[in-house]
Image: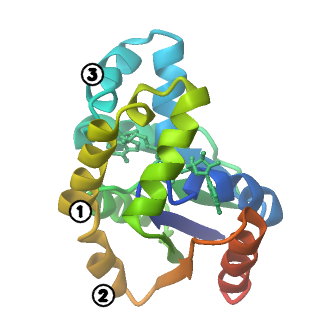
Amino acid sequence: MINIVLFGKPGAGKGTQAEFLKDKYNLVHLSTGDIFRFNIKNDTELGKLAKTFMDKGDLVPDEVTIKMLQSEVDNNPRAAGFLFDGFPRTIAQAAALDAFLLTKNQKITATVAIEAADEVLVKRLLERGKTSGRVDDQDEEKIRNRYQEYNEKTAPLMDFYKAQNNFYTVDGIGSIDEVTERLSLVLDTL
Ligand code: B4P
């Protein structure tokens, strides 16, 4: 069983690449962003709560996110492995994920970061905002806030995973196919 964390700044291409990797490696794809957006669309209590944070570009509180992720893992008992996309985003989430997987005699096999410069990514998100309807993609100030959240709360995770000797990076600039190819080169070694 392999469990992969896809890591990267907002817009780095985690969701885009996960669509290809999940089929290629037979992994269950869990995107916390997608799960929140599904709940917002269906106007659930979780969705209403998440929306107040996401629309501003803030992270949703850890206790809500961790509980939600754990229940998604539990809903897939036959999974051959998981592709975590957009989770963990804080040290508390990463520690909770490790502890939770340990109760199932499992662990994170590798964390793979997709790297790209902020200026390229801001342009990508503003471009997506023209058609996606995503409030958090439409306003440069909110996008900048997402990068601030990333720098403060998510970037420290790189050292957390480097200390576990399972951290890899790939260049996220290039065509979607080129980035998939780079990620595959890493996953094929695991
Ligand atoms: P997410 O849904 O995780 O989204 P993301 O960071 O915007 O994007 P991703 O990296 O997946 O980019 P994508 O492939 O879509 O998070 C949204 C919000 O949800 C967060 O801000 C937070 O509020 C909340 N949230 C989610 N998880 C949370 C957690 N664990 N804890 C707390 N809060 C959480 O690509 C972006 C764009 O680039 C697309 O338009 C794509 O087409 C384009 N693109 C991709 N690859 C490209 C390439 N190689 N070249 C050119 N364009 C490319």
Q: Amino acid at mark 1?
A: Asn
| Residue behind mark 1 | 151
The spot of residue 156 in percent (x, y) is 23, 71
When asked about the image quadrant of residue 60, the answer is top left
Q: Residues within 10 Å of mark 3 (few under 14, many from 20)?
A: few
Q: Residues within 10 Å of mark 1 (few under 14, many from 20)?
A: few
Name the residue at the right extreme.
Answer: 24
Q: Secondary structure at mark 1?
A: helix
The circle drawn on residue 124 is none
The spot of residue 5 in percent (x, y) is 50, 65
- Let me know if residue 74 appears in the view: no
Vertical arrangement, residue 70 with respect to residue 50, above or below: below
The spot of residue 54 in percent (x, y) is 33, 31
Say whether mark 3 is within 8 Å of ligand 1.
Answer: no
| Residue behind mark 2 | 163
Left or right of residue 180: residue 158: left
Vertical arrangement, residue 134 with respect to residue 180, above or below: above
Q: Amino acid at mark 3?
A: Thr
Q: Secondary structure at mark 2?
A: loop
